[in-house]
Image (cartoon, rainbow, N blue to C red):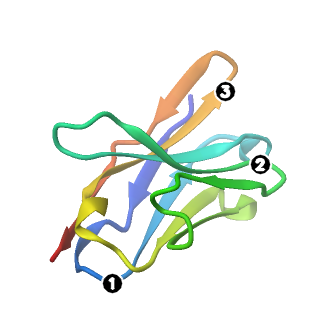
Amino acid sequence: QVQLVESGGGLVQAGGSLRLSCAASGSMFSIYTMRWHRQAPGKQRELVASISSGGSTNYADSVKGRFTISRNNAKNTVYLQMNSLKPEDTAVYYCNVDILSSGYWGQGTQVTVSS
């Protein structure tokens, strides 16, 4: 059973920074692509960033140049460094991994950016 636990959310002023962490249980963490998604009130969940087992990264256009996804396989942890935050970044942020035909999600961490 895979468990994902996010942390690091909070309230920050526009222009500020936060670093989210997602700790994963289980072995073989390093071979899977990890993803961060977010869901704002009244909106659909959207993919923010992903990082492959080899370290290749992809970002949503809305966060390119401001967010950085990284991973530490020794700690079974994936990070999302968020800089130059905007009020529209306000959302619950979720960590996700797909293993075979199953998707695993964390409980989410709230990020609120005030103007």
Q: Residues within 10 Å of mark 2 (few under 14, many from 20)?
A: some
Q: Position of residue 108 (x, y in %)?
A: 33, 47
Residue placed furthest toward the top: 101
What residue type is disc 2 on? Ser
Mark nearer the viewer, 1 or 2: 1
Q: Are marks 3 and 1 in contact (CB under 8 Å)?
A: no
**Left or right position of 50 against 57:** left
Q: Position of residue 26 (x, y in %)?
A: 64, 40
Marks 1 and 2 sit apart, C-alpha to C-alpha, by: 30 Å
What residue type is disc 1 on? Gly
The disc, 3 or 2, on the residue closer to the chain's N-terminal end is 2
Q: Are marks 3 and 2 in contact (CB under 8 Å)?
A: no
The disc, 3 or 1, on the residue closer to the chain's N-terminal end is 1
Query: In the structure shown, which secondary structural element does the residue marked by tag 2 occupy?
Result: helix
Q: In the rendered structure, find residue 110 and report the number of the disc placed on it.
A: none
Q: In the rendered structure, find residue 16 and report the number of the disc placed on it.
A: 1
Q: Which residue is mark 3?
A: 99
Decide: is 92 above or below 66.
above
**Left or right position of 4 against 27:** left
Q: Position of residue 1 (x, y in %)?
A: 56, 28
Front one among 36 and 115: 115
Marks 3 and 2 sit apart, C-alpha to C-alpha, by: 12 Å
Q: In the rendered structure, find residue 30 and report the number of the disc placed on it.
A: 2
Residue 89 visible here: yes
Mark nearer the viewer, 3 or 1: 1
Q: Position of residue 24 (x, y in %)?
A: 57, 48
**Left or right position of 39 against 106:** left
What residue type is disc 3 on? Ile
Residue 111 visible here: no
Viewport quadrant of the C terminus:
bottom left
